[in-house]
Image (tube, rainbow, N blue to C red):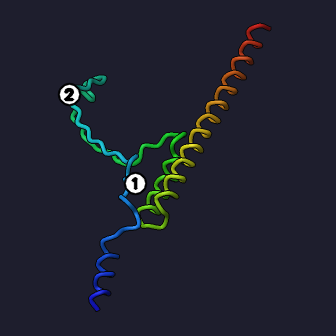
Amino acid sequence: MRNIYIIIIFLLCCSPASAEQDCAVMDYETGSFTVGFKAGGLLWGVGPEVSWGSANGTQWNDALQHMVAEYQELCSRYNTGRISDAEYKKEIDSIIKHSRGYTLELNRIFREKKDTLFDEMEREVSQ
């Protein structure tokens, strides 16, 4: 019976994940407070102005959106112990490789669009 207790305690103390990862790496929270003076026409909207607010969410960027979604899914799988440390590192490398390829592809597409627009403008000017 004592051996069973030792095994249970050992299993409770050991985690399949070596350390939990931060899944909220792209989350942000901001607060703002502004004081100003506004002036409008014919005594309308004249005087001091005070405003405050806050915003929170995820910092999205065209090149990062897919990568962050993949990372958050991978992070939750790692933290729950569904994948090993080696698999996690392999998946991270794969996500980075895909995101770099995606960014390069977007840059190529935008460069081609820009070149096409400038070529059309050149043709219009030269006529």
Considering every residue shown, the one lying at the far front of the view is 3
- Characterize the local packing of mark 2: few (<14), some (14-19) or many (20 or more) Cα atoms within 10 angstroms: few
- Quadrant including the C terminus: top right
Q: Which residue corresponds to the image point at 32% horizontal and 81% vertical from the top-left?
A: 8
Task: Give residue 88's position: percent from left, percent from top.
Answer: 49, 56
Task: Kindly check if marks 1 and 2 are in contact, taking CB atoms under 8 A apart as contact.
Answer: no
Considering every residue shown, the one lying at the far bottom of the view is 1
Please give the label number shown on residue 23: 1
**SS category of the residue bearing label 2:** strand
**SS category of the residue bearing label 1:** loop
Task: Give residue 18's position: percent from left, percent from top.
Answer: 38, 60
Q: What kind of residue is marked 2?
A: Gly
The front one of 110 and 85 is: 85
Q: Quadrant of residue 15?
A: bottom left
Q: Which residue corresponds to the image point at 38% horizontal and 52% vertical from the top-left?
A: 24
Q: What kind of residue is marked 1?
A: Cys
- Characterize the local packing of mark 1: few (<14), some (14-19) or many (20 or more) Cα atoms within 10 angstroms: some
Task: Give residue 64's position: percent from left, percent from top.
Answer: 51, 42
First of labels 1, 2 by sequence position: 1
The residue to which callout 2 is attached is 47
Q: In this image, 122 relative to 16: left or right?
A: right
Q: Which residue corresponds to the image point at 24% horizontal and 40% vertical from the top-left?
A: 52
Q: Quadrant of residue 42?
A: top left
Considering every residue shown, the one lying at the far top of the view is 126
The front one of 42 and 79 is: 79
Q: Give above or below for 119 relative to 97.
A: above
The nearer-to-camera label among 1 and 2 is 1
- Quadrant including the N terminus: bottom left
Q: In this image, 67 relative to 122: left or right?
A: left
Q: Give above or below for 91 relative to 6.
A: above
Distance from disc 1 to disc 2, alpha carbons, whole Å, reads 45 Å
